[in-house]
Image (cartoon, grey):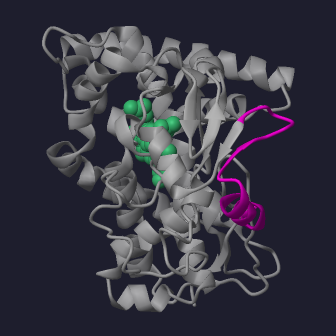
Amino acid sequence: PHAFYRELRADAPVLQDARLGSFLVSTYRGVSSVYKDARFSTRAYTGTLEAIHGRTVLSMDGLLHAKNRALLTPHFRGQGLDRVHALIHRTAAKILEQIVPRRAQRLADEMRDSADGSRVDLVAGFAHRYPIAVIADMLGLPESDHELFAGWYGKIMAFVSNLSGDEEVHRQGLQARADLAGYMAPLIAYRREHPGDDLISMLVQSQVDDYRMTDDEVRAYISLLLTAGGETTDKAFGSLCKNLLVGGEWARVRDNRDLVDAAIAETLRFSPPSQITTRMCEEDVELEGVQVPAGSTMLLIAASANRDESRFERSEEFVIGRPDLDPARAFSGAAGHLSFGTGRHFCLGAMLAKTEMEVGLNLLLDSFPGMRLADGAEPVDVGLRTRGPRDLYVNLAA
Ligand code: HEM
């Protein structure tokens, strides 16, 4: 889509799409200003997302949103995150164990290409399973329930991405919502009485003034974590490995780990997992010289804004350590890339996602210093709203 986005930035930074009726916003300045302007709300998310999760921070605005953010933020930043660092490492190592052929023959056999015994698909084998396993571990779910949890995740994701309205996908999504709710209810109730050091306990104990989350809000939030933190981090990790391997940068980053943060930040700029987000315009607004009437849906194209040539030099190139992207700020919502949004809905899980990518990449660099793309592998990115490599066949043993 990048040739189209380039044309949009040059000719029509704010454009009403004749077919959709929505406004496409494609420049860095345009996307940032909509995110920061309270006249554009997240009411646009109430439909599908509320149907599958219930009410969550993402579709709230105003005071209720601020209170919920205040409850949640401590668990995903600073000390809250330090606590889960070791857990993330354990989770990553566990999954890696399963994809290393000699240690888990059965799984490796499933993933290995018959023509070349050392080919492993890093997307299906690692990236796809890792973030959801981290969330399950953070919630303190027993290992034996991980498969169940991953199954609900798959059905909920399919529901959210069901643009063609397939009835069976819709039905299965709602069933997964009910099953997840049924599974979570006793755990949430138990943790109210017997708090531990897992995320469920943190959520039920959090309090701002006299405000606490109800059981249903906790359940909705856990459900949101699956879509907000699962597929996005999955795609981000796939893109990170792909960008390094395709660009021939694996060895350089392996030998200079100071580059890991910059490689993650640049991957998020260059390959945003969530390419387009949505807002509802609540009153008549003039945006970049274009009149936007109240009630309009806005499509904010991070994939384009992140390649805006007026913000980033050589914007269409993947450049680790580029001077115009400070990795220290790229995960804080302060004038970096726009892949986590910015403003009051800035991604709550940005630091968690960054930690997962950092731990996962370092582990792969340590375990497979000679990793390279498998012979003949030509990974391609797929998806328009969320995007990442469809598969990534690598040779681990090289
Ligand atoms: C919000 C992207 C990982 C939880 C957002 C938004 C974006 C985003 C673009 C803003 C949506 C909007 O304003 O319309 C990403 C990407 C990730 C990632 C690219 C991975 C690389 C995570 C993780 C979590 C998470 C791991 C788990 C904690 C959230 C939540 C919100 C959010 C709860 C809603 C915040 C609010 O509305 O106030 N994310 N996300 N995200 N993200 Fe992430």
Residue with the most extreme front position = 289
Residue 107: which quarter of the image? bottom right
Residue 18 within the magenta-colored segment of the rendering = yes
Residue 394: which quarter of the image? bottom right
- Name the residue located 30 percent from the left edge and 52 percent from the top edge: 332
Depth check: 17 or 90 in front?
17
Say if 108 sits above or below 81 in the image: below
Depth check: 277 or 162 in front?
277
Say if 346 sits above or below 360 in the image: above
Q: Residue 74's x, y, as percent?
A: 20, 36
Magenta residues, as a range? 1-22
Residue 175 within the magenta-colored segment of the rendering = no
Left or right, residue 338 beside residue 174 = left
Depth check: 127 or 95 in front?
127
Left or right, residue 204 beside residue 121 = left
Q: Quadrant of ligand 1?
A: top left
Tally the numbered discs: 0
- Name the residue located 40 percent from the left edge and 42 percent from the top edge: 347
Q: Quadrant of the C terminus?
A: bottom right
- Is residue 119 visible in the rendered image? The answer is yes
Q: Residue 210's x, y, as percent?
A: 15, 8
- Name the residue located 58 percent from the left edge and 82 percent from the top edge: 245
- Is residue 136 visible in the rendered image? The answer is no
- Name the residue located 83 percent from the left edge and 22 percent from the top edge: 168
Say if 373 sits above or below 51 in the image: below
Q: Quadrant of the N terminus?
A: bottom right
Q: Residue 359's x, y, as percent?
A: 35, 64
